[in-house]
Amino acid sequence: MSQNIQLKNPHLEGMPSDYLYHLAINVPDTKNTSDIQKQFGDVRVICTGGTAIRMLELAKYLGKLLGVQDTSEPVDMCAKGHRYALYKVGPVICVSHGVGSSTFSVVLHELLKLVHYARCQDPIFLRIGTCGGIGVTPGTVVVTKDAFNGLLRNEHEIAILGERVVRPAQFPESVIKDILAYGGRPDDGFQIISGNTMGTDCFYEGQGRTDGAICEYTAEDKMKFLHKCHDLGIRNIEMEASFFASVTQKIGVKAGDICVTLLNRLDGDQVNAEKKEEFEHRPFLVVGRYIQHLLKK
Ligand SMILES: O=P(O)(O)O[C@@H]1C[C@H](O)[C@@H](CO)O1
Ligand SMILES: O=c1cc[nH]c(=O)[nH]1
């Protein structure tokens, strides 16, 4: 039986209205959300990713792939908020989240409330991103299993009311299995693998780079760290995985993190802009086929 998601906040019950500030979406009456249901009630998949342009391109790609009737250019439904972009194509929304878990956190809380008010049935949250690989060929698509934080722990840690709160950070096996089974094809010309992912709070020192504005360790220390990550099964590094896994796991909503590696960090730190252009759309193929499979169910 399909289900609306249950949020983990008893205070929401006592709120007559709710303004999703960064999305610029108003819920004037939380007990009667028929307008929001009309607009978003059919949403089955919430795709997220760092940049607005990637999300627009993904929306256009999925619109064609899924045969969505409306062929006009998708419109940013959250433009008024000036923070994030949200495009809707049929039962899929594509939403930008910025760099790192702090910006992602804001929009993910609001998206979870949005799908709750819209009474979306069994929504699945996906992140379609870029990352640095560890010991894998650049251009490989990695589907995250366990998400590690920058302390090399398979958990996410945040400060709440002045206290450290630590939450587990795993993605559901069923989602990983289906993405691998339906997403990849041998003739795609790139590999798709599952592996653990480290989500850091910093692109430079947090990821063991030696090309930031500050670096107080040696090149040997860096390599030792990257090899330690590899020994833990970590095959890619980005900046959202542990947060994303922990929040979706806490709410009990299905989620998956699908990222393409732009470089092999065992070979260097600098990202090559041409490689980014070449590789950035690879996860679209994977996610597109997975969504086709989901919508057939
Ligand atoms: O989805 P994107 O490509 O933004 O993901 C990674 C992790 C950070 O957000 C960012 C750092 O360059 O790229
Ligand atoms: O090395 C990389 C590349 C992309 N995104 C990251 O967070 N790290």
Image: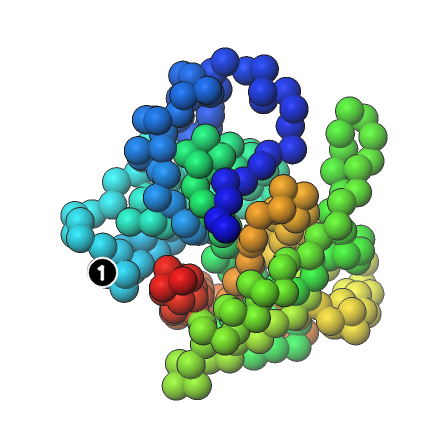
| Quadrant in the rendering for residue 144 | bottom right
Location of the C terminus by quadrant is bottom left
Residue type at mark 1 is: Gly
Classify residue 53 as left or right of residue 253: left
Q: Residue at x 47, y 16 (%)?
A: 17
Q: Vertically, is 73 above or below 148?
A: above
Whole-percent x, y for residue 149 in the image: 73, 53
Classify residue 173 as left or right of residue 130: right
| Quadrant in the rendering for residue 119 | top left
Which of 278 and 62 lies nearest the eye of the viewer? 62
Q: Residue at x 78, y 24 (%)?
A: 161
Whole-percent x, y for residue 187 in the image: 39, 86
Q: Vertically, is 14 above or below 72?
A: above
Whole-percent x, y for residue 94 in the image: 39, 48
Residue lying farthest bottom?
187
Q: Is residue 22 in view?
A: yes
Whole-percent x, y for residue 80 in the image: 34, 26
Residue lying farthest front?
1
Q: Which residue is mark 1?
A: 67
Q: Within 10 angstroms of label 1, few (less than 14), some, or many (20 or more) residues?
A: few
Classify residue 227 as left or right of residue 48: right
Q: Residue at x 56, y 54 (%)?
A: 255
| Quadrant in the rendering for residue 229 | bottom right
